[in-house]
Amino acid sequence: MCGIVGIVSHEPVNQQVYDALLLLQHRGQDSTGIATADGSQFHMVKASGQVREAYRTRDMRSLLGNIGLGHVRYATSGSAAREEEAQPFYVNAPYGIILVHNGNLTNTRELNAEMHNVDRRHLNTHSDTELLLNVLANELQHASGSPTLDAGKVFDAVTRVHQRVEGSYAAIALIAGYGLLAFRDPFGIRPLVLGRRSGQNGRDEWVVASESLVLESGGYEIVRDVAPGEAIFISPDGEMHSRQCAANPRLLPCSFEYIYLARPDSVLSGISVYDARLRLGDVLAEQVVAEVPKGDIDVVMPIPDSGRPSAMQLASKLGVEYREGFFKNRYVGRTFIMPGQSVRKKSVRQKLNAMSTEFRGKNVLLVDDSIVRGTTSGQIVDMARAAGAASVTFASAAPPVLFPHVYGINMPTRNELIAHGRTNREIASVMGADHLVYQTVEGMNRAILAGQSTVTELEESCFTGNYLAGNVSDEYLAYVEATQTS
């Protein structure tokens, strides 16, 4: 999971990209990068850490030009600690291309072999973003056939990229002297939204970003989501072209975007993230009623922040008091996307504090957006008991996470997943909870997809083991686990 943005403006774009990355900071805190184009010359700054600390005044002054892109990174491929794997990535031929990418490629072994043996291109990192960039560069070189480039040739190249690359990818690229390219994988797993506003000279200005809140904050009209398999090409003067470049596109947005990853004030594929989380609470209430003895819940409390909408709605449905018992230190990163188990364990008590007056002597129902590794959840149960709770029931707005997520979320090994190979009773025992209630897969789909017809199915492989994009076999999963644990 990463956050990406690209902007074509008629004014200097450096501050606009910076402001957009601040809004996308929740999507990654490992590293960040901004690149701009001033005519055919690129300018780029990359750094480890978060956006607010990464850029200095001298950096911003060096980012010249009216076209730019930016990235915040949460590592799912390569190393979080290696600054050279921070995005954007650059290749000088053909034309000069800079690219940012949100997602995870699943056929990297095959592509790496093709890079070396067929395309004769050199890779300097283990990042699948550098790999995607070089595939695009190779196809642009073959598609152009001449020194000049137009939208049609760009779209021909993206068509070939779709034929070669498997997995999830939302990507934005700058092509020196020609403009900005954005494209999305044929399943639309990772989000990408297109916006437009009128510049002071009356010409259109454009933005593509991971989430709609970037558009709304910048005064852009939301035009639409970039369709699965579609490519958007925008010239420096604001002329926009688009083409469907995939043979059989199919919209399968990631269910975890709605459950946890996206900010609640975003709209993805026409579905309000906040409304989806409220409905997840409605449906979860049905499971709580079915599984928890009546009278065993005095109060409902959320695990802040992404568990709050579901907890509010669940309390309302149950007719039980809703209270805030945990208070959050907002200067600590999101524990789910911390780089390692030891860091996650340390950060939970730095991040949350339990107020004993809200817990003492009460039968508490704690509601979180999901339970992945169980590390955070178990510590939260311990904190509730230490604060005086008489009993602790834990409810997850998401179904049990049983399988690795290979499309851009860092949960690669089955042994890391607390639900893998355990019953609900066993999971509750490991966490130290009196009762444990999970959302069902059917309930999750019913909640997220309600009230619209654009999205009819979700990417939900981590709950079901049904991998629809790429050739994800048991052998591939074993390979991923081996590379993550070696």
Image (cartoon, grey):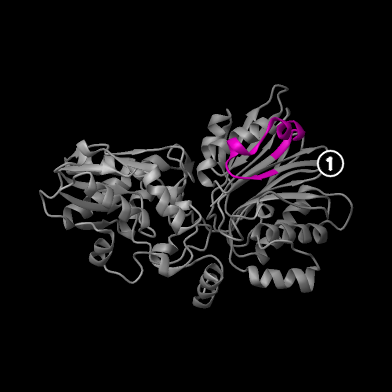
Task: Name the residue located 56 percent from the left edge and 36 percent from the top edge.
Answer: 22
Instruction: Give the x, y percent position of residue 438.
Output: 28, 57
Position of 67 with respect to 106 (left or right) is right
Find disc 1 in the rendering and name its residue: 40
Residue 69 in view here: yes
Position of 39 with respect to 188 (left or right) is right
Residue 292 lies in the magenta stretch: no
Task: Please identify the quarter of the rendering in which residue 456 is found.
Answer: bottom left
Q: In this view, does 357 lie above or below 427?
A: above
Task: Please identify the quarter of the rendering in which residue 305 is found.
Answer: top left
Magenta extent: 46-68
Task: Name the residue located 89 percent from the left edge and 55 percent from the top edge.
Answer: 146
Instruction: Give the x, y percent position of residue 304.
Output: 35, 41
- Determine whether the residue tagged by mark 1 lies in a helix, strand or loop: loop
Residue 48 lies in the magenta stretch: yes
Say which amino acid is labelled 1: Ser
Residue lying furthest bottom in this view? 475
* Of residues 169 and 341, the one drawn nearer to the viewer in this rendering: 341
Q: Is residue 109 above or below residue 53?
A: below
Q: In this view, does 159 lie above or below 7?
A: below
Task: Name the residue located 65 percent from the left edge and 42 percent from the top edge.
Answer: 70
* Of residues 21 and 235, the one drawn nearer to the viewer in this rendering: 21
> Which quadrant of the figure contains the C terminus?
bottom right
